[in-house]
Image: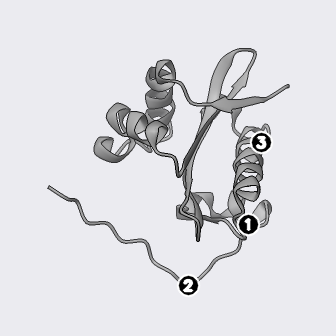
């Protein structure tokens, strides 16, 4: 299977919401929804990439590099394409972009269910806790 990684387009949004929903990752639409996706795409610090195979969107990744820290915020792969190299291709593409921008490391926000994937591709646990405050 040939995987093509490209930049996000607004026309991708419905498929990305579908993938998030299928993966039970669409719990905070204010953070992961269509308007957020548009804001991320306009942010110079952000990297927002889409994976396609046979012209079908099969996954995506959102990350940011602020000049100091590079962080992968979200990786989501359609269930039909999981365990086929799509996630790894997306992480590799983001890592290449971060290297181009001068990032010395990359971190990821991960769930307990995804830790095995991240460890398999070379990430290790660090003693931090991600916390969230909703701003109104």
Where does the image place residue 17, in percent across and percent down from the top left? 43, 30
Where does the image place residue 13, in percent across and percent down from the top left? 45, 25
Q: Which residue is mark 3?
A: 89
Residue furthest to the bottom in view is 127
Residue furthest to the top in view is 55
Q: Which residue is mark 1?
A: 119
The image quadrant of residue 98 is: bottom right
Q: Residue at x 73, y 66 (%)?
A: 119
Q: CA distance from mark 1 to mark 2?
A: 15 Å
Location of residue 2 with respect to 42 vertically, above or below: above
* Label located before the other in sequence (1 or 2): 1
Location of residue 130 with respect to 64 vertically, above or below: below
Mark 2, residues whose alpha carbon is within 10 Å: few (<14), some, or many (≥20)?
A: few
Q: CA distance from mark 2 to mark 3?
A: 27 Å
Identify the mark at residue 127; answer none if there is no mark.
Answer: 2
The residue closer to the viewer here, 129 or 65, is 65
Location of residue 63 with respect to 26 vertically, above or below: below
Mark 3, residues whose alpha carbon is within 10 Å: few (<14), some, or many (≥20)?
A: some
Mark 3: secondary structure: helix
- Quarter in which the N terminus is drawn: top right
* Label located before the other in sequence (2 or 3): 3
Asked whether residue 67 is in view, the answer is: yes
The residue closer to the viewer here, 67 or 89, is 67
The residue closer to the viewer here, 77 or 95, is 95
Task: Describe residue 110's horizontal placement relative to residue 2 as left or right.
Answer: left
Q: Residue at x 55, y 62 (%)?
A: 110
Mark 1: secondary structure: helix
The answer to the question of whether label 2 and label 3 lie on touching residues, with beta carbons closer than 8 A, is: no
Task: Describe residue 33's horizontal placement relative to residue 121 as left or right.
Answer: left
The image quadrant of residue 8 is: top right
Location of residue 122 with respect to 50 vertically, above or below: below
């Amino acid at each position: 299977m040939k995987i093509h990684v490209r930049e996000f387009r607004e026309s991708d949004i419905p498929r990305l919401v579908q993938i998030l929903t299928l993966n039970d990752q669409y719990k905070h639409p204010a953070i992961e929804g269509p308007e957020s996706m548009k804001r991320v795409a306009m942010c110079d610090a952000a990297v927002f990439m889409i994976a396609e195979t046979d012209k079908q969107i099969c996954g995506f990744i959102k990350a940011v590099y602020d000049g100091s820290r590079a962080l992968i915020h979200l990786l989501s792969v359609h269930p039909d394409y999981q365990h086929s190299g799509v996630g790894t291709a997306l992480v590799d593409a983001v890592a290449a972009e971060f290297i181009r921008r001068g990032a010395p490391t990359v971190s990821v926000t991960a769930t307990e269910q995804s830790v095995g994937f991240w460890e398999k591709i070379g990430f290790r646990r660090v003693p931090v806790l991600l916390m969230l405050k909703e701003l109104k």
